[in-house]
């Protein structure tokens, strides 16, 4: 039988905040952190991150004294994220947004009206600091807490930018700017081809790189990276690395993306983006919601692990099980699905990745969604929202939820992740054989320590299996880090009966697979 050890033992893993040392010069280490699979990335919409919804109607009524999220009030949440184990922020676009042909009453974060002007919506009027100084202060405060900052680079331009600089955009046969898929509020920038890069668009993006580096950012997440040529990215990434070799680049791209977003658009596959210099991409973990057999998850883990040796430089991926483009996990398979995502992110050789609201189980259901608005700052007078996804179109409430159990597990899992950092960076991953197609099992081993993970992808019923763990025996000290039902160990195997969607995590000392 697995040795019983009090769960209180795990308290040693939990982060205990310490007083801040005297301010020192920040030295960017994000690329090293990311490539060693030790980043815990938290995606935030600055406009909602610390929004103050006093009347609790879900909308920020600025004219009534409520305050939208901004660079300064966001600082108040940094200690919370640090305590939860977050060490990197992915900040959704912070540049000025378009107001014409817009979606939502504030304008989509990804409808860029400028690439060198900050969004005035993110300025606190309660401070005499300039908008740029407020942004710099936020990033500096994150750095004081050893939290790195990735800034989102929009893939397209707003209609406002098109009216101002039409030469930057792809045109169709009738001379009209091209709309990407169903993103009706943006138009595709013409970055050129592999043979002929468009210098005007390249310079626009180069200026963006200069700007966010001056703000103090540690890396860039490139929105819909495949719609630009590899050569375009190669030049831009090399330009940034001349300034800061640790500047990290994350491509929003997937191995399952095979077609351009619109006729006339460029399509560069994920592997060409990695060859161009990107440090990582999204892989296809977001498809787990559609996977019914454990083999689909296991095959994808095998695929992403193989990338480390495929390119001339190391590459990594994020645990993109849920992103701002995906339904809230609690709407798919409840708290159990969120828990599974959390512990997979914490025990696989990937970088952990979460959206604001995940730790407390936000379902992102807004009662006012897609209804006519009383006030608007764009030409859209409806509260446009993607159901079940974090709002990026309006002045809406701070993401939240009431799941205290998930929040506790979030902190515990990230603390455990920090504890096993050497395994995630250097460990040997081993897929374990199971007798049930709904149950996955794997292990990570390094320096006489192993982590065993068993999970049930059946979210509707119990699943039983025998899991082979070569050379395991009952004399080994085995700590149940995360279990809801007790596994039974025998020589070289475990017998499990897992609850619907249950995931188990065991720490085994003096043992390597």
Image (cartoon, rainbow, N blue to C red):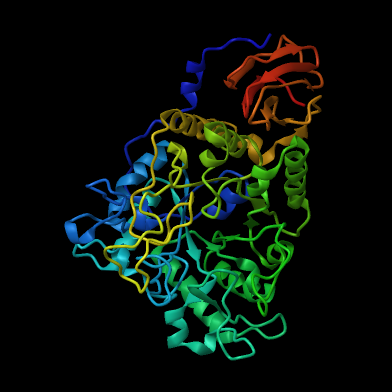
Q: In this rendering, is residue 189 above or below 251?
A: below
Query: Relative to 10, does residue 267 appear above or below in the rendering?
Result: below
- The residue closer to the viewer here, 497 or 211, is 497
In the displayed structure, 465 sits above or below 211; it is above
Which quadrant does the C terminus fall into?
top right
Q: Which quarter of the picture shows residue 226?
A: bottom right
Residue 239 visible, this angle = yes
Query: On screen, 308 above or below 480?
Result: below
Whether residue 126 is visible: no
Position of residue 273 measured from the top left corner of the image (x, y, whole percent)? 68, 65
Residue at 59% in and 86% down: 171
Tally of marks: 0
Residue 101: name its quadrant: bottom left
Position of 73 with respect to 251 (left or right) is left
Q: Is residue 64 left or right of residue 382?
A: left
140 sits left or right of 38 in the view:
left
> Where residue 395 appears, x then y in whole percent?
33, 59
User: Residue lying farthest front?
Assistant: 372
Locate residue 343: give its quadrant.
top right
- Give 500 or 486, whichever is nearer the viewer: 500
Task: Tell me what residue is drawn at x 61 percent, y 17 percent.
Answer: 485
Of residues 409 and 20, the one nearer the viewer is 409
Where residue 349 sits in the image (x, y, percent)?
A: 66, 41
Which sits in the foreground, 396 or 380? 380
Position of the N terminus by quadrant: top right
């Amino acid at each position: 039988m697995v040795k019983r050890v009090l769960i209180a033992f795990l308290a040693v893993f939990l982060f205990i905040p310490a007083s801040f040392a005297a301010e020192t010069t920040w030295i960017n280490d994000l690329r090293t952190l990311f490539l060693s699979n030790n980043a815990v990335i938290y995606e935030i919409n600055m406009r909602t991150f610390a929004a103050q919804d006093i009347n609790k109607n879900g909308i920020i009524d600025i004219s009534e004294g409520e305050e939208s999220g901004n660079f300064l009030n966001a600082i108040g949440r940094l200690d919370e994220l640090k305590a939860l184990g977050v060490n990197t922020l992915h900040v959704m676009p912070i540049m000025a947004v378009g107001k014409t042909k817009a979606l939502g009453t504030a304008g989509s974060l990804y409808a860029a009206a400028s690439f060198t002007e900050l969004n005035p919506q993110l300025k606190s009027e309660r401070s005499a600091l300039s908008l740029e100084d407020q942004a710099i202060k936020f990033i500096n405060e994150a750095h004081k807490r050893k939290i790195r900052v990735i800034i989102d680079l929009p893939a397209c331009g707003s209609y406002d930018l098109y009216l101002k600089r039409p030469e930057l955009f792809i045109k169709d046969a009738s001379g009209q700017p091209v709309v990407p898929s169903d993103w009706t509020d943006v138009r595709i920038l013409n970055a050129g081809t592999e043979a002929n890069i468009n210098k005007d668009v390249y310079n626009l993006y180069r200026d963006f790189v200069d700007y966010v580096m001056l703000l103090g950012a540690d890396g860039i997440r490139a929105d819909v990276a495949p719609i630009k040529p590899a050569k375009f990215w190669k030049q831009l990434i090399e330009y940034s690395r001349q300034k800061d070799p640790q500047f990290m680049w994350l491509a929003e791209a997937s191995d399952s993306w095979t077609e351009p977003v619109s006729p006339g658009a460029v399509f560069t596959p994920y592997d060409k983006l990695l060859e161009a210099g990107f440090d990582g991409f999204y892989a296809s973990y977001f498809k787990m919601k559609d996977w019914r057999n454990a083999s689909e998850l296991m095959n994808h883990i095998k695929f992403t692990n193989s990338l480390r040796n495929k390119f001339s430089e190391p590459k990594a991926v994020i645990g993109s099980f849920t992103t701002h483009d995906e339904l809230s996990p609690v709407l798919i398979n409840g708290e159990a699905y969120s828990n599974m995502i959390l512990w997979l992110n914490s025990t696989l050789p990937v970088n952990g990745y979460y959206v604001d609201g995940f730790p407390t189980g936000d379902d992102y259901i807004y009662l006012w969604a897609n209804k006519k608005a009383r006030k608007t700052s764009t030409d859209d007078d409806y509260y446009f929202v993607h159901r079940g996804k974090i709002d990026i179109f309006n002045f809406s409430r701070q993401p939240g939820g009431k799941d205290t159990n998930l929040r506790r597990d979030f902190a515990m899992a990230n603390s455990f992740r920090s504890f096993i950092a050497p395994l995630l960076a250097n460990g040997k991953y081993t897929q374990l054989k199971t007798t049930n197609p709904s149950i996955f099992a794997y292990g990570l081993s390094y320096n006489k320590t192993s982590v065993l993970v068993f999970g049930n992808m059946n979210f509707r019923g119990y699943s039983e299996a025998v899991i082979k763990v070569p050379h395991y025996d009952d004399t080994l000290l085995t700590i149940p880090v995360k279990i809801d039902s007790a596994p039974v160990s025998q020589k070289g195997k475990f017998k499990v009966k897992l609850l619907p969607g249950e995931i188990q995590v065991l720490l085994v000392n003096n043992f390597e697979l």
